[in-house]
Structure formats: C-alpha cells, structure tokens
Amino acid sequence: MAHYLADNPAPEAVAALPGLTLLEFGVDWCPHCQGAQALLAQFLSAHPGLRHLALEDGKGRPLGRAYRVKLWPSFILLRDGAEIARAVRPQGGNKHSYLPRKKGKVVAACLRPDLNPDAPHVILCNSCPPERTAGEQLARQGGVIPVFLKENTSSWKFQGLFRVVGSETHPDACAPYAARSAWTKGQIKQVLKLEQQVKF
C-alpha cells in the first residue's frame, strides 16, 4: 500500500489549512523515506492531534515546487498555512556533522547524548572550523530549528522545535559543560542554550 499521496492538494489549499500541519514529501521507493518511517510513526503517535500529509513528490509537482523541496524526505511544519520549521533528510550525530546547514543557514540539530548530555536544551559547539562557524550562525540567525537526539545506531528521536536564547563563549563558562561530556575542556568553544518554542 502506498504511503505517499499521489493526488496532491493545490498549494493554495494547503496554505489555507488551520492549526498545525506536518507536510512530508517523498516517494515510496526512496530508501531515505523508508528509513524515516519508524521515527515519523513515533512522533505522530506522541502528537495525535497533529495533521499529517504524506505527499508524493517529483519533477514538476506543483506542491513540492511551491515549498522548494529538493531532497526526500522533507518534513515541513506549518502553522495556519505558514512554514515555521523544516527538516530535510536529517542526519548527523558525529563530532563534525551535528549542525547541518543549507545555504549557510543551520537547518537542524542532530545530537548525540554523550557529546551533548544536556540536549536538547544545550548544544556544545567544538573548535572544528565548520562546526564552530555553524554554532556562530545558529546563535545569530533567529527562528526555530528541529532538534533530534540519537537513541542508537539507526534511531533518532524528535525533541521538538527550539530557538537559541543564550550563548556562552568564555572558557570558564564552557568548562563545566565540557566536563560532563565526551569533549575535552579545550574543544568546546561555545555553549548554546535553547528553549522549546512549539508545543503540541
């Protein structure tokens, strides 16, 4: 049985939907889409009131193009028809890919508990140049991002939508956080403090 709806609603119909709606763009044969279903099912069971539309995408499909979908699966959260968050094939969890970016903007946080023991409310940013830059970008970009915590080798758990509400860069402020993690004291250059923004 197909998961994705081939007959997509018109973009203007989706824009008119009231309340919270999760759009999921993909295709049934996509291995990334298949791999995301267990996490999606867990999330939807925890939020039974959330409207969910699984939408088949492809070249020339108006709805996917209206939301600038380029990779599958793409999850877009709407509030009263307006986009408030997006997760595109979320991945990460190692020491160098936990703040994925698109066009210079951080689009998600994919965190390992051993490296971020206070997640999802605290993100530890290391001295690796790309991740240090990503942390600085996240601290100033505003808006919300989806946060995921790694549970095991192939399982992630969605924590919610968060925004940065504080940032520490002084070594003395960063040291206590580093001491509770798998990082060393000198590796942590910034501590980001987050606050959940969308509660279902």
Image (cartoon, helix red, strand yellow):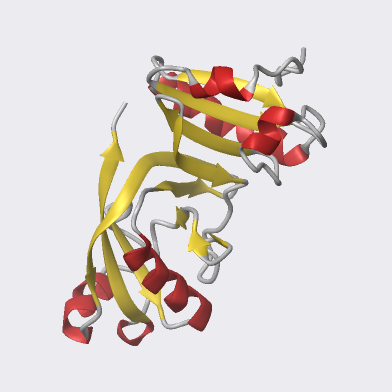
Q: Is residue 61 left or right of residue 87?
A: right
- Please name whichever residue, 38 or 23, is drawn nearer the observer in this view of the structure: 23
Q: Is residue 61 left or right of residue 77?
A: right
- Whether residue 35 is visible: no
Q: Identify which residue is drawn at 77% across, 27% down.
A: 28
Q: How many marks?
A: 0
Relative to 34, residue 49 above or below = above
Outermost residue toward the left? Answer: 172
Whole-percent x and y of residue 172?
A: 17, 83
Check the picture and name the quadrant holding the C terminus: top left
Q: Is residue 169 visible?
A: yes
**Residue 174: quadrant of the picture:** bottom left
Vertically, is 20 above or below 109? above
Left or right: 90 as drawn, with respect to 49: right
- Image point (39%, 56%), residue name: 113
Going by the picture, which residue comes out furthest to the top? Answer: 1
Of 111 and 22, nearer the camera is: 22
Q: Position of residue 109 (x, y in %)?
A: 45, 55
Q: Residue at x 54, y 61 (%)?
A: 100
Quarter placement of the N terminus: top right
Q: Position of residue 37 (x, y in %)?
A: 62, 29
Image position of 108 with respect to 52: above or below? below
Q: Nearer the viewer, residue 164 or 15?
A: 15
Residue shown at the point (35%, 51%) measured from the top left: 143
Position of residue 127 relative to residue 176, above or below, is below
**Residue 90 placed where, x, y %?**
57, 49
